[in-house]
Image: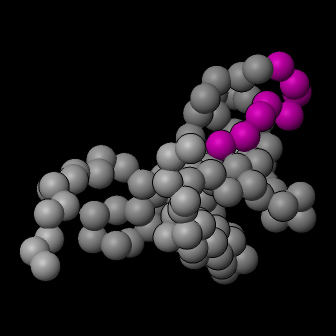
Amino acid sequence: MPDTTPDVQVGALAINVTVPDDLRWTDERRGEVFQLQTITVRLLPDGHLAAKAYGRPVAGGRGGYVSFRVPDRPELAALIEAGATAASRRWAEHRGLE
């Protein structure tokens, strides 16, 4: 049977992974200290992953939506890869639109 699936172009595949309390870190931007709490992971067209971290100002308040580089730490790399793997399983098992 011929494949009748239309060509579908997917622009972005991204997930958000919550950073467990014991792996969170702080970074500074424009004189404000942020605690990084989530990582946005994107699947690139070549199959590799890209990641940026986001968080909240330690002093409180809303703060801006500013991305931070994810430190080169094995436990963070493992978290990113585990998140991508879990997301791929969930996507593969989707049940369609309700």
Left or right side of 2 for 38? right
Please give the name of the residue rendered at 79% of the width and 31% of the height, measured from the top-left corner: 57
Q: How many marks?
A: 0
Left or right side of 36 for 51? left
User: Which quadrant: the C terminus?
Assistant: top right
Q: Nearer the viewer, residue 16 or 71?
A: 16
Q: Position of residue 90 (x, y in %)?
A: 59, 66
**Which residues, given as a range, are shown in magenta?**
54-61
Do we see residue 92 in this rendering?
A: yes
Please give the name of the residue rendered at 87% of the width and 25% of the height, measured from the top-left corner: 60
Q: Quadrant of residue 75?
A: bottom right
Q: Position of residue 83 (x, y in %)?
A: 63, 68
**Residue placed furthest toward the front:** 1
Do we see residue 80 in this rendering?
A: no
Q: Quadrant of residue 28?
A: top right
User: Which quadrant: the N terminus?
Assistant: bottom left
**Residue placed furthest toward the left:** 2
Please give the name of the residue rendered at 55% of the width and 59% of the height, measured from the top-left corner: 95
Q: For residue 52: magenta? A: no
Q: Position of residue 59 (x, y in %)?
A: 88, 27
Q: Position of residue 16 (x, y in %)?
A: 62, 51
Please give the name of the residue rendered at 50% of the width and 46% of the height, measured from the top-left corner: 97
Left or right side of 87 for 14? left
Q: Nearer the viewer, residue 78 or 94?
A: 94
Task: Give the answer, above or below, for where 87 lies relative to 25.
Answer: below
Q: For residue 60: magenta? A: yes
